Amino acid sequence: MDKDVRDRLAERATKLGFDSLQAYIRVWAKAETEGRNLNFGQDDWGEPSDAAAKRLNRWAEEARQGKNVSGPFNTVEELMEDLLQ
């Protein structure tokens, strides 16, 4: 394999969370032999819209300020009760 291709593939494997190029190739090869297709592209969620990002940032800031925060909860039942209100 061409060194440039190998280096770029190793970099891609690292960005995908694999600890080595060998691990990336092993996962791909196993899927290939099982007839599965792997898609390491953009996930189904996609990128958040600008409006969604602004809302998330606003909510995070409100949480840091102690606004609109529930809990802490000691049991799952307490959490569920709060969610159902």
Image (cartoon, grey):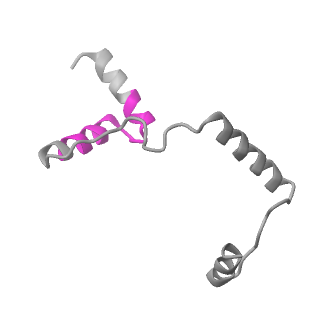
Residue 74 placed where, x, y %?
70, 81
- Going by the image, does 72 lie left or right of 29? right
Q: Is 51 above or below relative to 84?
A: above
47 and 40: which is toward the camera: 47
Nearest to the observer: residue 56 or residue 2:
56
Vertical comparison of 45 with 63: above or below: above
- Quadrant housing the N terminus: top left
- Whether residue 28 appears in magenta in the rendering, the answer is yes
Q: How many marks?
A: 0
Q: Position of residue 50 (x, y in %)?
A: 65, 34
Which residue is more in the foreground, 85 or 72?
85
Left or right of 34? Residue 44 is right
Q: What residue do we see at 66% from left, 83% from top?
A: 75
Q: Is residue 37 left or right of residue 14?
A: left
Q: Residue 76: name its quadrant.
A: bottom right
Q: Quadrant of residue 5?
A: top left
Q: Main secondary structure of the magenta part?
A: helix
Query: Which residue is pictured at 14% across the width and 49% down the height?
Result: 34
Quarter of the image where the C terminus is located: bottom right
Where residue 44 sits in the image (x, y, percent)? 43, 44
Residue at the image point whose x is 72% and y is 45% from the top: 55
Of residues 71 and 5, the one drawn nearer to the viewer in this rendering: 71
The range drawn in magenta is 11-30
- Decide if residue 80 is on the left or right side of residue 31: right
Q: Is residue 29 magenta?
A: yes
Q: Residue at x 68, y 80 (%)?
A: 81
From this view, report whether residue 29 is shown above or below residue 8. Answer: below
